[in-house]
Image (cartoon, grey):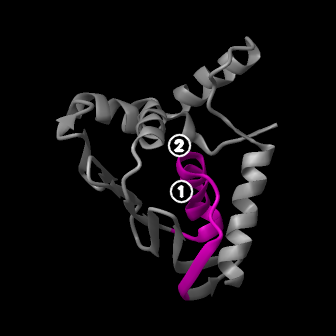
């Protein structure tokens, strides 16, 4: 079973994961999510778990119940990684370290590693605006053909995301 957390299928985030795994710098991440934590924030949390693994330290700053969802501002923290989540009317993510800069949100998409631009503006537009579901289907095909490297959110990753959401709400 797979869950449509499509961000981990995007080649941009796969490239980011590979770079982050080699870079031992301190990372500061800012995430803004719209709607609610279950509705839209869950997609960013699934991506954060994919990129950085699990978090034990959670600090909640503000929480408001809205229907069946929650609007929560909070921080996730572990060695060399600080992630600030804020409810907003837009979606964005910014990842920064000494050698690394990635920004996606609004009209700005940038990705640099060691001061070198990793993708052109045209490539970034393609990865984010044109073929989002195509990347999911492409990875599903890799899974069906038993290829080793496929990037999909299976039921375990979705369950881990759900558990983290519950911890955040109850922090």
The earlier-in-sequence mark between 2 and 1 is: 2
Residue sitting at x 78%, y 54%: 159
- Relative side of 138 to 127, left or right: right
Residues rendered magenta in the picture: 35-62
Residue sitting at x 47%, y 71%: 85
Task: Please identify the residue farthest to the top as the structure is shown.
Answer: 145
Q: Quadrant of residue 38?
A: bottom right
Percent x, y for residue 167?
71, 74
Along the viewing direction, whichever of 31 and 101 lies nearer the viewer: 101
Q: Mark 1 points at which residue?
A: 44
- Relative side of 70 to 113, left or right: right
Position of 131 relative to 51 (above/below): above
**Mark 1 secondary-structure assignment:** helix
Q: Is residue 40 magenta?
A: yes
Q: Is residue 120 magenta?
A: no
Percent x, y for residue 6?
58, 40
Q: Are marks 2 and 1 in contact (CB under 8 Å)?
A: yes
Residue sitting at x 45%, y 67%: 82
**What mark, if any, has residue 143 been given in the picture?**
none
Percent x, y for residue 96?
31, 56
Which quadrant would the N terminus be assigned to in this image?
top right
């Amino acid at each position: 079973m797979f869950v449509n957390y499509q961000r981990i299928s995007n080649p941009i985030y796969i490239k980011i994961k590979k770079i982050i795994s080699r870079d031992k710098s301190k990372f500061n991440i800012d995430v803004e999510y719209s709607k609610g934590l279950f509705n839209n924030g869950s997609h960013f949390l699934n991506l954060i778990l994919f990129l950085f693994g699990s978090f034990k330290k959670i600090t909640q700053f503000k929480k408001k119940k809205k229907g069946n969802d929650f609007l929560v501002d909070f921080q996730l923290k572990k060695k060399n990684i600080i992630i600030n989540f804020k409810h907003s009317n837009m979606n964005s993510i910014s990842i920064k370290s000494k050698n690394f800069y990635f920004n996606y949100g609004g009209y700005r998409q940038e990705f640099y590693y060691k001061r070198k631009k990793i993708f052109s503006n045209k490539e970034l537009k393609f990865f984010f605006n044109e073929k989002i579901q195509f990347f999911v289907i492409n990875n599903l095909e890799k899974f069906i053909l038993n290829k080793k490297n496929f990037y999909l959110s299976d039921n375990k990753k979705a369950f881990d995301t759900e558990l983290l959401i519950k911890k955040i709400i109850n922090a």
